[in-house]
Image: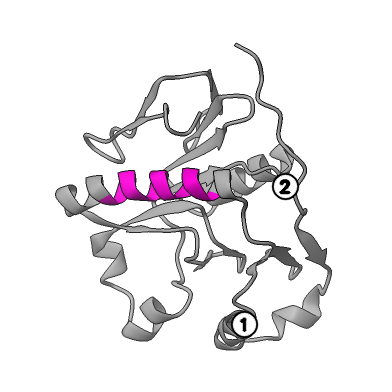
Amino acid sequence: MSTVLAPTEVSPVVLHFGSLLRRMSDHEFFEFCQQNQDWRIERTAEGDLIIMPPTGGKTGQRNAALTATFYSWANADKTGIVFDSSTEFRLPNGAMRSPDVSWVRRSRWEELTDEEQEEFPPLCPDFVLELRSPSDRLSELKAKMEEYIEQGAELGLLLDPFERRVYIYRPHLPVQCLEQPESISGDPILPGFTLTLAEIW
């Protein structure tokens, strides 16, 4: 099967602030993001800002299908909460990240205060998924996935629709790369969940 080429799209902008940005409190950073809602803004553990433009139509369609699939499973399973790509989390290392899809065990979510739930939740999701878009460098997405696992995620999926590959990340295990899989199981972290990839490819 031929490879699907990634079209050109506006690339993320990286602003290097270093320690200057880290003086901004978590609440101030949340307010800063609220005042710039046209952009997805992440902060690295080093204090740099990554400003990502809105996605194109195909990426948005894929994201919607993924979120709907995970939400449907979680709504039946009841053990955790699913979040879409607009949700940002404060990881233990201080980075602010917004996975395309994420899932947090309900018991961990309910330990947070109302304020922590309303702003950027101070935890790493138990499960994270990143979907490569035309503007994403695969090497940077892989580094982000490694960060999630180091910060506490138990399962991570990186979907590359252009190469039709899925990279599976788990703690203390080598990264697994699947070529053109038809489906992916979430067991045991997401018990009974299966992601069919026909809509994504």
Instruction: Look at the image and tell me in which quarter the N terminus lies.
Output: top right
Closest to the observer, 14 or 11:
11
Left or right of residue 5: residue 99: left
**How far is mark 2 from mark 1, CA to CA?**
24 Å
- Would you say residue 65 sits in the magenta stretch? yes
Residue that badge 2 annotates: 135
Task: Give the residue furthest to the right.
Answer: 16
Residue 51: x, y in percent?
71, 66
The extreme front residue here reads: 57
Q: Amino acid at mark 1?
A: Phe
With respect to residue 176, does 65 lie above or below?
below
Q: Depth-wise, is mark 2 or mark 1 nearer the camera?
A: 2
Q: Is residue 55 above or below residue 37?
A: above
Q: Which residue is mark 1?
A: 29
Q: Could you tell me the amino acid type at mark 2?
A: Ser
Residue 78, horizontal then vertical, whole percent: 17, 54
Q: Residues within 10 Å of mark 2 (few under 14, many from 20)?
A: some
Nearer to the camera, 8 or 72: 8
Looking at marks 2 and 1 on the same chain, the residue that comes earlier in the sequence is marked by 1
**How has the structure been colored for display?**
one colour
Residue 58 highlighted magenta (yes or no): no
Residue drawn at x 64%, y 80% is: 36
Image-based side of 49 in relation to 165, left or right: right
